[in-house]
């Protein structure tokens, strides 16, 4: 026999799982995935592991990831600098944000 407290716990877990899955797409923006292998009519499957094409794809993914990290870091720094410039107190209270 299922107790009422067990049903409540199950309900809370189900609601928590539903909220977590609803939030996941919003967090997907922060997950960068390199372009990887491009599928074309002449290349319908992944290249063999450690083949020349596989190494080219790997190096391309590394370059794309490095560019993404540099651009994201620059954007975060720009946001912090903008916040510093425009959120200072100008009413004479000498409140500075560092």
Image (tube, rainbow, N blue to C red):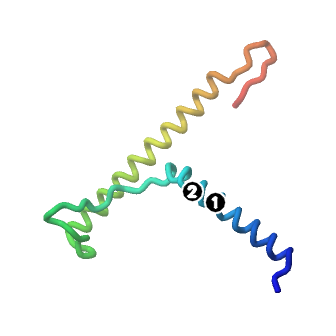
Quick check: 52 left or right of 9? left
Q: Nearer the viewer, residue 78 or 42?
A: 42
The reply to whether the C-beta atoms of the residues labelled 2 and 1 are less than 8 Å apart is yes
Task: Name the residue at 68% across, 24% down.
Answer: 87
Q: What element carries label 2?
A: helix
Asked if residue 86 is positioned above or below residue 68 in the image, the reply reads: above
Q: Is residue 74 above or below residue 91?
A: below
What residue would you read off at disc 2? Answer: 24
The image quarter in which residue 91 lies: top right
* Residue at x-position 85% and y-position 75%: 4
Question: x, y (%) of residue 18?
Answer: 64, 61
49 horizontally vs 9: left or right = left
Question: Which one is in front, 5 or 70?
Answer: 5
- Element carrying mark 1: helix
Quarter holding the C terminus? top right
Q: Where is residue 10 in the image (x, y as percent from the top left)?
A: 75, 72
Q: Is residue 3 above or below residue 79?
A: below
The residue at the far left in this view is 42
Q: How many marks?
A: 2
Question: Residue 98 — which label?
Answer: none
> Which residue extends farthest bottom?
1
Specify whether 45 is left or right of 87. left
Tell me where residue 61 appears, x and y as whole percent. 34, 58
Indicate the quadrant containing the N terminus: top left, top right, bottom left or bottom right: bottom right
> Which residue position is annotated with label 1?
20
């Amino acid at each position: 026999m299922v107790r009422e407290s067990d049903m409540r716990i199950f309900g809370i877990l189900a609601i928590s799982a539903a909220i977590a899955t609803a939030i996941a797409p919003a967090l997907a923006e922060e997950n960068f995935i390199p372009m990887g292998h491009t599928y074309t009519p002449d290349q319908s499957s992944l290249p063999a592991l450690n083949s020349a094409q596989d190494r080219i794809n790997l190096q391309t993914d590394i370059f794309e990831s490095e560019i993404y990290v540099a651009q994201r870091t620059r954007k975060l720094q720009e946001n912090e600098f903008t916040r510093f410039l425009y959120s200072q107190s100008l009413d004479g209270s000498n409140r500075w944000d560092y």
